[in-house]
Amino acid sequence: MDDPYWFGQIAAANALSDVYAMGGEPKTAMNLVAFPVKEMDLSILRLILEGGIEKMKEAGVVLVGGHSVEDSELKYGLSVTGFVHPDRVLVKGGMRPGDRLILTKPLGTGVINTAIKADMAGPELTDRVTRLMAELNRDAARVMTEFPVHACTDITGFGLLGHLAEMITGSGFGIMLRAGDVPIMPEAIEFAGYGLLPAGAFKNKEFRQSMVESPPGLDSLMVDLFFDPQTSGGLLIAIGEEHADRLLDSLIDKGVTQSRIIGEVIDRAGEKIFITPS
């Protein structure tokens, strides 16, 4: 992301997402900045901070300070504090057999960002993926807290399969993931076919491939996309089958329109993720 204002927006949305994923409401934040003052003009930093502040305002979060250092590489993020009742804290674990899995944003931002760096993505697509990454998970989180959700995480650098692997590690359960139901930006599929996969996708695959099983006929490209590292991705929610359709309908009614039920938790030993075509 070359636009410093949107860089700040996306970084802030990404940081706030951790609180939303735990069922909380972010309230305060501190800026964390590393900036190469000898190589970059301070106007760039100003725009980054403006973008971050605007996103915090949108989230109803108060900036209470921050810390900055000179560094050879630009870095910007937030330390966020939020509120949640102790009995309603959501964690990655806690899934139960039969739970349905709901994903609230489409995959593909890693691939498309790689295409942007290669000057292969047009302005309309660049704008669309930028706004997707800057979109808060606030509305999805607020809807989610009205239901008896068992577990939740947000999809970021480890990709969908990496975060699913985290959720089942130590549980004894498995995941049945329906590839045809996973929302993916169509351009990401096209660019991945050209080989425009980020290095992080291969690292994720190397680390978690042993936990993933897919049928021989499934396009390997889809598996690679499920390992695509996301920037400020959606929430991944585990909820009982009897509540899943109502939660999905509520998410869509509240504007989280790309939400989909993508699979379920299965009572099968081995802590594996089984991918089926549909």
Image (cartoon, rainbow, N blue to C red):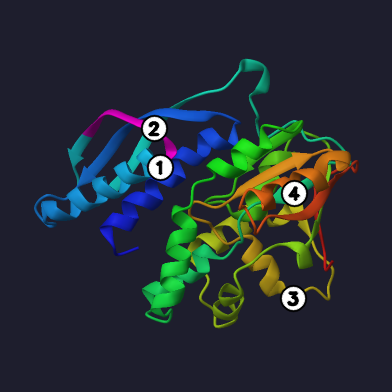
Q: CA distance from mark 1 to mark 3?
A: 40 Å
Number of callouts? 4
Q: Position of residue 226 (x, y in %)?
A: 65, 61
Amino acid type indicated by mark 3: Asp
Amino acid type indicated by mark 1: Glu
Q: Position of residue 236 (x, y in %)?
A: 66, 46
As for residue 66 lying within the magenta part, the answer is: yes
Is 269 left or right of 248, judged from the image as shown? right
Residue marked by disc 2? 61
Q: Residues within 10 Å of mark 1 (few under 14, many from 20)?
A: few
Is 161 left or right of 132, judged from the image as shown? right
Q: Residues within 10 Å of mark 4 (few under 14, many from 20)?
A: many
Pair 1/3: label in front: 1
Label 2: element kind: loop
The residue lying at 37 percent from left, 80 percent from top is 119
- First in sequence: mark 3 vs mark 4: 3
Pair 2/3: label in front: 2
Label 1: element kind: helix
Q: Residue 58 — which label?
A: 1
Q: Residues within 10 Å of mark 3 (few under 14, many from 20)?
A: few
Residue marked by disc 3? 219
Q: Are marks 2 and 3 in contact (CB under 8 Å)?
A: no
As for residue 119 lying within the magenta part, the answer is: no
Q: Is residue 137 above or below residue 79?
A: below
The residue lying at 25 percent from left, 47 percent from top is 50
Range covered by the magenta-colored residues: 58-67
- First in sequence: mark 1 vs mark 3: 1
Pair 3/4: label in front: 4
The residue lying at 88 percent from left, 40 percent from top is 242
Q: Are marks 2 and 4 in contact (CB under 8 Å)?
A: no
Q: Residue 248 — which label?
A: 4
- First in sequence: mark 2 vs mark 3: 2
